[in-house]
Image (cartoon, rainbow, N blue to C red):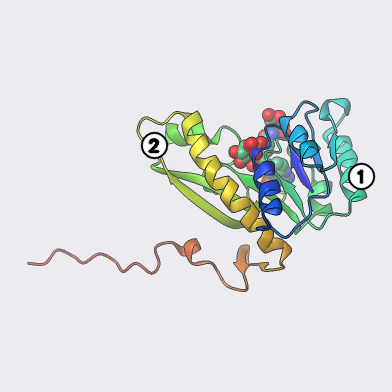
């Protein structure tokens, strides 16, 4: 089950991975909170049931989330994937899908949670940026990180150019992470995600690099 709000390029990457046999999964349905979301058309083109549930038709966040849950549960999915989904989800929703709700966020969390990450990264002067796939918890963009991918930031980057560079990596890591989850290879211990019971090497990126030698003489 994939939830979207807009363009749906991550959805497309997941569809492509399934169709290419790189992701053993079935996308049961796609739900969007924006009726005009291009991602819903992508789903229909791929023969996947697509539903729009417009959040503006509900008096409260909780009522929207209840409607969303009803539609999702109709399909009995094993995992619920947020792919550019732009609505904060309420506690009841998070609890209902605890442990099987994934998000992709366009920054190297815990840096730049929330919105407008690329502009904020440029503003802050970081030289490395990227994307994170994480389990969704009550703390927005604060759940355990499954996998991250980094890209360089160049001096003449605009938010749009940087977003595009990050997006290429998103399309690579999201199908990967979903596959790990569905294969039962992920676990969470002390707030850290393990793959096959081990921390992945890149989570401690520099730990195998010996400290540099002090200058001699
Ligand atoms: N819900 C919970 N409870 N926890 C998370 O970690 C969530 C979540 C819902 C969405 C995606 C997240 C991101 O990857 C996500 C993670 C939207 C907002 C936001 O402020 C923040 C984070 C994320 C998504 N949305 C505004 C709101 O009032 C609306 C903005 C809009 O419609 O354009 O919901 O960044
Ligand atoms: C992606 O970059 C995704 O990481 C980000 O929005 C874009 C959606 O693109 N998600 C968020 O910012 C969540 N708040 P897409 O619709 O083409 O997949």
Residue 143 visible? The answer is no
Residue 7 badge: none
Residue 180 visible at all? yes
Task: Please provide percent x and percent y for residue 157.
Answer: 41, 31
Q: Position of residue 67 (x, y in %)?
A: 90, 39
How far apart are the two marked residues, 1 and 2, measured between alpha carbons?
44 Å
Q: Ligand 1 falls in which quarter?
A: top right
- Secondary structure of the residue carrying numbered label 2: loop
Earlier sequence position, callout 1 versus callout 2: 1
Left or right of 102, for residue 29 = right
Decide: is 125 above or below 185. above
- Residue identified by numbered label 1: 70
Q: Residue at left 50%, top 45%?
A: 130
Q: Quadrant of residue 69?
A: top right
Q: Position of residue 204 (x, y in %)?
A: 46, 64
Q: Is mark 1 within 8 Å of ligand 1?
A: no
Q: Is residue 209 above or below residue 82?
A: below
At a point 81% along the width and 27% down the height, the residue shown is: 35
At 89% from the left and 50% from the top, the residue drawn is 75
Q: Nearer the viewer, mark 1 or mark 2?
A: 1
User: Label 1 crowding class (10 Å Cα cut-off): few <14, some 14-19, many 20+?
Assistant: few
Q: To which residue does mark 2 refer?
A: 125
**Cβ–Cβ under 8 Å for marks 1 and 2:** no
Which quadrant is the C terminus positioned in?
bottom left
Q: Does 167 appear above or below 79? A: above
Query: x, y (%) of residue 213?
Result: 21, 67
Residue 186, quarter of picture? bottom right
């Amino acid at each position: 089950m994939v939830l979207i709000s807009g363009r749906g390029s991550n959805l497309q990457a997941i569809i492509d991975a399934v169709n290419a046999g790189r992701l053993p999964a079935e996308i049961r349905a796609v739900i969007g909170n924006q009726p005009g979301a291009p991602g819903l058309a992508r789903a229909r083109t791929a023969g996947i049931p697509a539903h729009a549930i417009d959040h503006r038709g509900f008096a409260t966040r909780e009522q929207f989330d209840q409607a969303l849950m009803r539609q999702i549960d109709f399909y009995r999915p094993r995992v619920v994937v947020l792919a550019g989904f732009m609505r904060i989800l309420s506690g009841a929703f998070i609890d209902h899908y605890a442990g099987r709700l994934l998000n992709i966020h366009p920054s190297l969390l815990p840096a730049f949670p929330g919105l407008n990450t690329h502009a904020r990264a440029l503003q802050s002067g970081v030289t490395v940026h990227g994307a994170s796939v994480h389990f969704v918890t009550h703390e927005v963009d604060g759940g355990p990180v499954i996998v991250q991918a980094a890209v360089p930031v160049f001096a003449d980057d605009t938010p749009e150019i940087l977003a595009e560079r990050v997006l290429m990596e998103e399309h690579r890591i999201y199908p990967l992470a979903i596959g790990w989850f569905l294969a039962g290879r992920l676990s969470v211990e002390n707030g850290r995600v393990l793959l096959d019971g081990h921390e992945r090497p890149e989570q401690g990126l520099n730990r195998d690099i010996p400290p540099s030698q002090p200058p001699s003489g």
